[in-house]
């Protein structure tokens, strides 16, 4: 990247700036909106300079939404907590189940192995609405409706196939000789799995966990149908801002900022693992 | 220490049969090289002993006990891999210490790692990650890991393949001593006949899943069991010519490119059939004058190679032979017409149909 003419470098700089503006603008705009009142947001023409207010955040955190039609109870913080619990539990469960399964699919050839792996992936093909109706009927019968366990379970449809298929690829990239060497050195296959295979696939496991966390976090339809208000995540809770007296743009923006921040921080933290994961091939052998 | 016994082991993968009734015994403290061209089944044999796959037939014993079906970690085997197979997320020290198995005590492990790495001259890189090591250091680390647990059987899968030429030469000198210290039964896989001859007490020649010959390096070179074995040893490789051998007055002779040459004494029955005549390039001599048994030839090219000169010769019938001559011997230049001689004892005869050696060299081996 260091070589290239001056004109080339200038052009590259301009192109990068334009792309950055294009992708970052919505996020920056929402961030700015979250510090404005509804009146400031809706004035025409919009202004970049304004007097910032923390009213939106106050309203979200206190749970009191003041509108023209009067005070409204909102449970945004509760929703945020629900999102954490549901996504976190779903990803943890999917990792516990998916990593050993991915290892099995990567290392062993068994009857119907490919069929099972593909069937698990195909859960991702079906539109969620297709499974929701029968699922809600089953859940009512089983008493799983409106329980954390029930929603975490159905979130596996999102998390498990993703983790299984991503981590499987990482396991396949590890030379089996490395594990053979560890076993010949006097370690059981369980130790070879936990001390060799899992650490070496670590970046892949982190990437898969992060991705599936984001997918779970962003899910809307499962929780909308299967959970009542006190167990709904932010994606569903955001509906509360569409009130009788209008749409509360400021609060929505603040809610978006609050709900995006955890995954964003997680992604920034995990970035070095993701990069490490991509360059694992250079270390092999 | 324990002896490694491989008894009539066979393995089939689909249409391929990389092991076809292999039998081989390695005594404790002995180094046996398994040598053969690529794809001949060397690695498959090693992996069956290590427990990565099981043989379809036959048995493998260590110290008199069958290890077939046992978990790899319970076989008492140390192994060094061609691609090193170091654990990339561990330091060289931890890599070596892992060879002590799951039950090693930390204090004991540290001193043993120190001792084995001193022996292998890698003390100064113990703190490094594998990716920071040179290929030579990687292989030494892998060897240390295989040796540290004092395994009863040591398997080395072409360990010098990925190491540069100078280091390979050094290790060829160092390895036999190092391996003998461990008094393990050592099976050493290689594709390089020189490496096999330099390191091993005995060489097992593996061709297409069958052991063609198991003998000392000298014996394999002087008395190869078949044409296939003769071709694999020697650089330049052995010269061959198709002849009909017959006995005249107690001596065996045959016709090479229209010239009748003596092929040593005809003890036993003369092979009254088509044969391959094999003569090592270094057993050929060149002269400008003809004589009894001298084969006329034309020098096509001369390649000086420091310690010897290699001549490409064409005999009268079009057969091309190579002669490796000491630099001070009469050589001739390209396009010269010369005569080729060889001593009758240098001639090796192989059955044209089966490739198995017949005649004189066989007698020498029996004696």
Image (cartoon, rainbow, N blue to C red):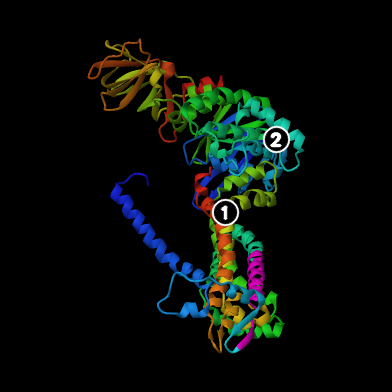
- Residue A216 position, x and y percent, is 58, 70
Residue A107: x %, y % from top left: 58, 55
Q: Residue at x 59, y 26 (%)?
A: B175
* Chain letter for the residue marked with disc 1 in the picture: A
Marks 2 and 1 share the same chain: no
Q: Give the percent coordinates (x, y) of residue B67.
A: 69, 43
Is residue A209 one of those drawn in magenta? no
The circle drawn on residue B149 is 2
Of the residues tagged 2 and 1, which is closer to the observer?
1
Using a 10 Å C-alpha cutoff, classify the residue at mark 2 as few (fewer than 14 neighbours), some (14 to 19) or many (20 or more): many
The quarter of the picture where residue B203 lies is top right
Give the camera-side residue of B75 and A147. A147
Alpha carbon distance from label 2 to label 1: 31 Å
Foreground of the two, A184 or B326: A184
Q: Main secondary structure of the magenta part?
A: helix
Is residue B292 in view? yes
Magenta-colored span: A70-93
Tell me the subunit letter for badge 2: B
Helix, strand or loop at mark 1:
helix
Q: Is residue A6 left or right of residue A172?
A: left
Q: Which residue is mark 1?
A: A203
**Front-most of residues A45 and B303:** A45
Question: Residue most toward the left?
Answer: B335
């Amino acid at each position: 990247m260091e070589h290239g003419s001056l004109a080339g470098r200038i052009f590259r700089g301009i192109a990068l700036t334009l792309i950055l503006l294009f992708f970052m603008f919505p996020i920056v705009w929402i961030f700015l909106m979250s510090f404005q009142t509804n009146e400031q947001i809706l004035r025409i023409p919009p202004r970049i300079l304004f007097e910032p207010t923390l009213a939106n955040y106050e309203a979200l955190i206190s749970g009191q939404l003041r509108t023209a039609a009067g005070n409204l109870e909102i449970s945004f913080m509760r929703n945020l907590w629900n999102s954490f619990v549901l996504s976190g539990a779903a990803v943890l469960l999917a990792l516990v189940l998916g990593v050993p399964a991915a290892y099995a699919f990567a290392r062993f050839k068994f009857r119907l192995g490919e069929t099972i792996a593909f069937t698990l992936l195909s859960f991702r093909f079906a539109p969620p609405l297709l499974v929701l109706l029968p699922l809600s009927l089953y859940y009512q019968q089983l008493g799983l409706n409106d329980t954390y366990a029930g929603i975490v379970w159905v979130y596996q449809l999102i998390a498990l196939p993703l983790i299984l298929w991503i981590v499987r690829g990482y396991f396949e990239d590890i030379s089996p000789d490395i594990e053979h060497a560890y076993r010949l050195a006097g370690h059981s296959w369980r130790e070879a799995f936990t001390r060799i295979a899992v650490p070496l696939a670590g970046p892949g496991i982190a990437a898969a966990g992060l991705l599936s966390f984001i997918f779970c976090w962003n899910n809307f339809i499962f929780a909308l149908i299967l959970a009542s208000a006190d167990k709904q995540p932010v994606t569903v809770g955001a509906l509360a801002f569409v009130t009788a007296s209008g749409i509360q743009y400021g609060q929505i923006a603040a809610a978006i900022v609050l709900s995006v921040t955890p995954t964003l921080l997680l992604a920034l933290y995990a970035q070095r693992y993701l990069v490490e994961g991509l360059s694992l091939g250079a270390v092999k052998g | 220490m324990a002896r490694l016994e491989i008894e009539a082991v066979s393995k089939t993968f689909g249409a391929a049969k990389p092991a076809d009734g292999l039998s081989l015994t390695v005594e404790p403290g002995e180094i046996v090289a398994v040598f053969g061209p690529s794809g001949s089944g060397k690695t498959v044999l090693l992996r069956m002993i290590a427990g990565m796959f099981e043989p379809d037939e036959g048995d493998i014993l260590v110290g008199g006990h069958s290890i077939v079906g046992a978990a790899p970690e319970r076989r008492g085997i140390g192994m060094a891999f061609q691609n090193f197979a170091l654990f990339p997320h561990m330091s060289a020290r931890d890599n070596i210490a892992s060879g002590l198995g799951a039950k090693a005590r930390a204090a004991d492990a540290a001193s043993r790692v120190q001792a084995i790495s001193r022996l292998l001259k890698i003390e100064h890189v113990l703190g490094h990650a594998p990716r920071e090591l040179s290929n030579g250091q990687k292989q030494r680390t892998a060897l240390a890991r295989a040796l540290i647990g004092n395994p009863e059987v040591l398997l080395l899968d072409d360990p010098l393949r990925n190491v540069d030429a100078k280091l390979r030469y050094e290790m060829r000198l160092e390895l036999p001593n190092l391996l003998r210290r461990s008094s393990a039964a050592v099976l050493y896989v290689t594709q390089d006949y020189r490496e096999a001859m330099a390191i091993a007490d005995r060489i097992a020649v593996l061709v297409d899943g069958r052991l063609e010959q198991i003998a000392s390096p000298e014996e394999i070179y002087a008395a190869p069991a078949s044409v296939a074995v003769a071709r694999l040893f020697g650089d330049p490789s052995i010269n061959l010519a198709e002849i009909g051998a017959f006995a005249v007055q107690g001596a065996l002779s045959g016709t090479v490119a229209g010239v009748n040459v003596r092929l040593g004494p005809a003890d036993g029955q003369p092979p009254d059939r088509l044969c391959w005549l094999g003569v090592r390039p270094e057993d050929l001599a060149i002269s400008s004058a003809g004589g009894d048994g001298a084969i006329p030839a034309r020098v096509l090219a001369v390649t000086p190679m420091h310690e010897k000169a290699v001549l490409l010769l064409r005999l009268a019938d079009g057969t091309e032979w190579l002669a490796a001559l000491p630099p001070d011997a009469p050589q001739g230049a390209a396009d010269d017409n010369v005569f080729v001689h060889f001593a009758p004892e240098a001639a090796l005869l192989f059955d044209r149909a089966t490739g198995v050696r017949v005649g004189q060299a066989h007698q020498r081996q029996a004696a």
